Amino acid sequence: MARWVYAFGGAATDGRAEMSALLGGKGANLAEMARLGLPVPPGFTVTTEVCTHFYADGERYPEGLEEQVEAALAAVEAAVGRRFGGEADPLLVSVRSGARVSMPGMMDTVLNLGLNDRTVEALAESSGDRSFAFDSYRRFVQMFADVALGVDRGLFEEEIEILKDDKGVEADADLDADDWSGLTARFKEIVRDETGAPFPEEPRAQLWAAIGAVMRSWRTPRARTYRRLHDIPEAWGTAVNVQAMVFGNMGGDCATGVAFTRNPSTGENALYGEYLANAQGEDVVAGIRTPQSLTAADAEARGSRLPAMERAMPEAFARLMEMRDRLERHFRDMQDIEFTVEAGRLWVLQTRSGKRTAQAALRIAVDLVEDGTIAPEEAVMRIEPQALEQLLHPTLDPDAERDVVARGLPASPGAASGRIVFTADAAEQAAASGEAVILVRNETSPEDIHGMHAARGILTSRGGMTSHAAVVARGMGRACVSGAGAVRIDTESEVMLAGGRTFTTDDRITIDGSAGEVMAGEIATIQPEMTGGFARLMAWADEARRLRVRANAETPRDAEAARAFGAEGIGLCRTEHMFFDTDRILAMREMILADDEAGRRAALAKLLPMQRRDFTELFRIMEGLPVTIRLLDPPLHEFLPRTEEETAEVAAAAGVDAVKLRRRALRLEEANPMLGHRGCRLGITWPEIYEMQARAIFEAAAETGARPEVMVPLVAVGSELERIKAVIDRTAAAVTEETGTAPGYSVGTMIELPRAALRAAEIASAAEFFSFGTNDLTQTAFGISRDDSGAFLGAYRDGGILPNDPFETLDIEGVGELVRIAAERGRGARPDLKLGICGEHGGDPASVAFCHGIGLDYVSCSPYRVPIARLAAAQAALVARGQEDKET
Ligand code: ADP
Ligand code: MG
Ligand code: MG
């Protein structure tokens, strides 16, 4: 005969913690605690298989269930020496739902089940407390009617309020036994009116109705929605726990409470929680009375006048402290415990691993390693890489007052305060004198990059999560709120209107890029902590991982940040960002708009020393770590002058006619710049550009002793790379000749076009390394322009066509397949080919795991994501190792 019921806490305990799939999390842990000898009121669990059966068989229970429930109930009766429905000292039970994972949205608990007009008298008799007995009775009728019969609980609350008004009393505690008795009778009338049937008096009928209600609550719309949002399979089903009641509402030496074995917001190793004397069930969280502290220290810290449990019931508190140690040692993690004290005696009703903030998760994991509870590898596995995000950026002081004037999208995390500036140049000037500023724009463009860099944060009134401002700010690690539609920005007159107030360049604001909030004035921020526990965890992660982690960085500030975050090199230095500075854009425009090679060479000569300085500085900061420099890549239109004024400026600098220049600029306009004259195509048509860049790189290398990796973008055909490699090699030879030192270097390519991925073997003959540019590879594989994807990607995700945004998480099936093919074919042709990834995906944990799996050498991501990538790489390695161990 199949087994549908598992006992716990009485003469026998059948389940254990590992059986949560069958018994639900609550039931499995109740069994485990009973095995540990902890004071668990006896009871039994109806398995999740019964739920599955129930739905598979037209809402009928499986054969044998009734007998097994009867037998288990008899065992509980024997264990506590009371009879369910008994006329003297009756057994009451709770009926509790409990899925594999904790699931709000399902049935609430029914307490005190088994009471009726006869048993309540018996309870009054046996407890010697009529008021307690009738308070319990009315609670039962209320809860049962609500969760098993679907009667609106507000109707009962109303009755209580009316009675209190009539009596002129404030608190529930001021009502006596007769009041509760009268209310219970009234509640039953309400139930009859609402349901058309009398309230069930028979305890067994109550029990089966409650069990059925738990089963049905698995399929309520609320529960289904919750499962959909949290990827919980429909097939799991819920278990039902039936358990002998213990009473926290039987007088002053009784209580109910919740305790965390450590502080869930800070991780501090101290008991944390609340309790209420003379209360039942979830009174603590219901907010009817002010809960009291558990520890005296906490009561003092809160300035509470109510006694802490430590003082009010020292015996039970001492047991709770023992239980805390016991549970932590056993479950090897911070626990969230529910308990009740009946007549001074402590009972435990639930334990589970407690939810916690990122900060607490880190501290707890490190402390548990330190006290020998878990191994370092386990600590590494316990922190969600994404959660580190919260720890890597400044956050707002939670106690500070916030004067929110507008809301936008949480485009790039972190909090920042500063004076308002309206232009990138103003931001740069202010930052040069050490002033903190927030750059406020309707939207940003590549020309604003230097100002975005200089600012502490960026606020835009337009644009979404993938707008220029959002993408660039995330890459730079600047806080950003984008698309704050209610903010009016007049850049001309330098005025911003928000929340009915006017802000000028004299005003300071604060933005919270994690919450998408804009606040007036300066608000204190808390700086992230990179030492202590964080450093220890990262050291363990570094120990475990195989993948190297580099950063995408081009400025000295980013390079320094990258190293501070533990980057092992630069995987992508985008040289174009270096040309947007005010003093360079002019020469750049001159070069682009020149008529012929001579004109271009003249402009490039102006850029050469500046570019050389950039690289020298970068090489010095990186101190011999690998640096991959990508030659000029973006569509030229990003550099073109936009205004008459700018065109005139370029014309003057180059000494050419402005009209002619304008005509040339028009000719450079492209229908589809993303697929246009860009990447290595620039190097094919105008080799002198790459020649200048290669020269700057090699001269800087000769000066510093660096060994640069020169990277050619957007290669589709092997001979493109061969052609450009020849220019690079020739330039290196020339620099060797001139300086007398031969710079060590390697030449490789981005793989960012499907054709390149397919023809990787051919391309590898000229490339010493591949770096997967998965942003462009995603764009070209899907044929989707990232900048235009906002209009439809949402519908694709909502409609289940795509599981997530392929620009955030690598599309492993499609784009990943191209990466895999390129890696295999490339390595087939050149076994020592170095492989890395430098798209935004390099900092996405799921994508990092994929990179580990296909044997890439490194991932490269924005500096602020380096710790996330280090942790994700470690977890990927540990998971793989675990699987290998299992196989052997
Ligand atoms: P949830 O899953 O919503 O936390 P529970 O089943 O844990 O619901 O029940 C909520 C509360 O009801 C418990 O924290 C406890 O205070 C009380 N409770 C449940 N069963 C009993 C019982 N047998 N005796 C006393 N109180 C109980
Ligand atoms: Mg609850
Ligand atoms: Mg609970």
Image (cartoon, helix red, strand yellow):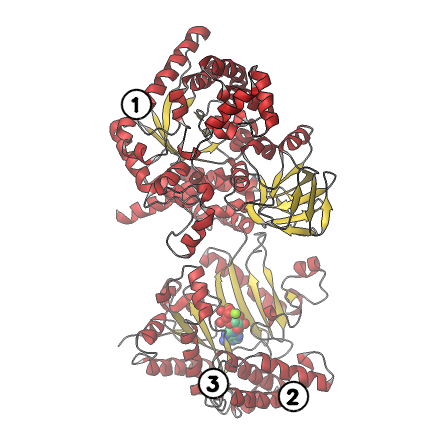
Other-residue count near label 3 (Cα within 10 Å), few / some / many at <14 / 14–19 / ≥20: some
Residue 730 in view: yes
List x then y, in percent, for residue 540: 45, 40
Residue 75 percent across, percent down from the top left: 40, 80
Q: Amino acid at mark 3?
A: Arg
> Which residue matches tag 3?
82
- Disc marking residue 719: 1
**Does the residue tagged 1 have its C-beta within 8 Å of any atom of ligand 1?**
no
Up the image or down, 846 lies above or below 590; here it is below
Is residue 346 visible in this depiction of the protein?
Answer: no
Between the residue at mark 1 and the residue at mark 3, the CA separation in whole angstroms equals 89 Å
For the residue pair 526 and 439, the one nearer the viewer reads as: 439
Instruction: Report the amino acid beneath label 1.
Output: Ser
Residue 143 circle label: none
Which amino acid does the dot numbered 2 rest on?
Asp
Calculate the distance from the C-alpha at mark 2 to the C-alpha at mark 1. Answer: 93 Å
Q: Residues within 10 Å of mark 1 (few under 14, many from 20)?
A: few
Front one among 16 and 505: 505
Query: CB under 8 Å between callouts 2 and 1?
Result: no
Callout in the foreground (3, 2)? 2
User: Residue at coordinates 25% horizontally, 27% vertically from top-left?
Assistant: 829
**In which quadrant is the N terminus drawn?**
bottom left
Counting from the top left corner in percent of width and height, residue 811 is at 36, 45
Q: Are marks 3 and 2 in contact (CB under 8 Å)?
A: no
Say which mark, if any, is on residue 179.
2
Between discs 1 and 3, the one toward the N terminus: 3
Residue 505 point in image, percent of width and height: 72, 38
Q: Tell me the SS state at disc 2.
A: helix
Residue at 43% in and 78% down: 213
- Given residues 533 and 104, the one toward you in this image is 104
Which one is in front in this view, the residue at disc 2 or the one at disc 1? 1
